[in-house]
Each structure stands twice: as C-alpha cells, then as structure tokens.
C-alpha cells in the first residue's frame, strides 16, 4: 500500500516517517484515529498546527483511508537541531464537537433538525 498524506491541502508524504504511520478503525461509536511522525531538520520550514486537515489516501487502490484533523502534537528533540513532531489525528467527528445544540426536537424530520443546527 502506497500512502499519500495531505495536510491542509499540501502533499506532505515525503516529510512523514512512513513506518510511524498508524491508523485505528473503530467499529463502534468511537472515533477513528491516525498518528505519524514528522521529522523537522535542515532546511524544512513547515510545522504542523492543531486543527490542520489530514487526508490519507491509498494511491494503489485510489481510496481515502482516513480524513480528519490534527488534535495533538508532541515535539521531541533528537539532536541539537533535529525535532520529531508526533502528530495525533481524529476523524471528522471532531468537527461535530464544535457545535453545542441546546434545543429539543419533537415531531421533526431529520432534514428539519439538520437545517436548524447548520445554518
């Protein structure tokens, strides 16, 4: 499986330590997660940011295997000028946590509820 990792619309595959990529598919109501390491050294200037969108595709199959956002970044120093960014992501359900619905819906269709929540 060949992976393509796009972060905020830019292909960052070459910057990611391939063996560090892990993905967890949960078949329940829990969210799917992904994690990987980004090696920051030399002339590299890009740094990941919380809430950056992450899309992971299997280029062999032509399918998306993960989509979500960066939720945590741990930075570790490996040498004087070398850093490892340990990036953790959650699937798009993390976006649903940004809206608090404080309304009760009775005798409404799903469409009516969605239209009331999302302007």
Image: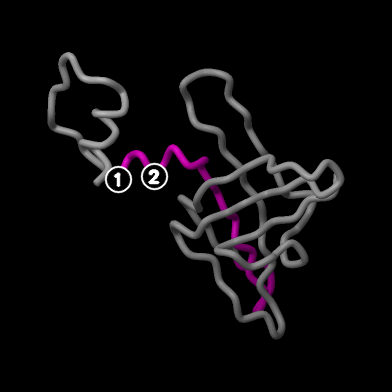
- Nearer the observer, 14 or 82: 14
Identity of the residue furthest to the top in this view:
107
Whether residue 8 is situated above or below residue 92 in the rendered picture = below
Element at badge 2? helix
User: What kind of element bears circle 1?
Assistant: loop
* Above or below for 25 versus 33: above
How would you rate the neighbour count of disc 2 (Cα within 10 Å): few for under 14, some for 14-19, many for 20 or more?
A: few
Rendered location of residue 69, percent (x, y): 50, 51
Q: Quadrant of the N terminus?
A: top right
Residue visible at 21% across and 19% down in the picture: 108
Q: Residue at x 79, y 49 (%)?
A: 19
Q: Would residue 69 appear left or right of 11 to someone viewing this image?
A: left
Q: Quadrant of residue 112?
A: top left
Q: Which residue is mark 1?
A: 98
Q: Which residues are magenta?
A: 77-97
Horizontal side of residue 86 vs 113, given as left or right: right
Residue furthest left as drawn: 103
- Image height check: is 115 above or below 47? above
Q: Position of residue 9 (x, y in %)?
A: 59, 64
Category of crowding for the residue at label 1, using alpha-carbon neighbours closer than 10 angstroms: few (below 14), some (14–19), many (at least 20):
few
| Apparent side of residue 103 relative to residue 23 in the rendered image (left or right) | left
Q: How is the image coloured?
A: one colour
Name the quadrant containing residue 93: top left
Q: Residue at x 58, y 24 (%)?
A: 26
Identify whether 52 is placed above or below 62. below
Say which mark, if any, is on residue 95. Answer: 2
Q: Which residue is located at x 75 percent, y 55 percent?
A: 4
Is there CB contact under 8 Å for labels 1 and 2? yes
């Amino acid at each position: 499986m060949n992976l393509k990792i796009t972060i905020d619309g830019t292909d960052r595959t070459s910057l990611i330590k391939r063996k560090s990529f892990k993905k967890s598919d949960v078949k329940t109501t829990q969210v799917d997660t992904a994690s990987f390491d980004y090696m920051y050294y030399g002339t590299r200037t890009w740094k990941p940011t919380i809430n950056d969108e992450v899309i992971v595709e299997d280029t062999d199959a032509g399918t998306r295997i993960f989509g979500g956002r960066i939720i945590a970044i741990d930075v570790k120093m490996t040498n004087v000028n070398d850093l490892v960014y340990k990036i953790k992501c959650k699937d798009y359900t993390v976006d649903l946590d940004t809206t608090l619905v404080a309304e009760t819906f009775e005798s409404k269709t799903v469409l009516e509820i969605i239209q009331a929540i999302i302007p």
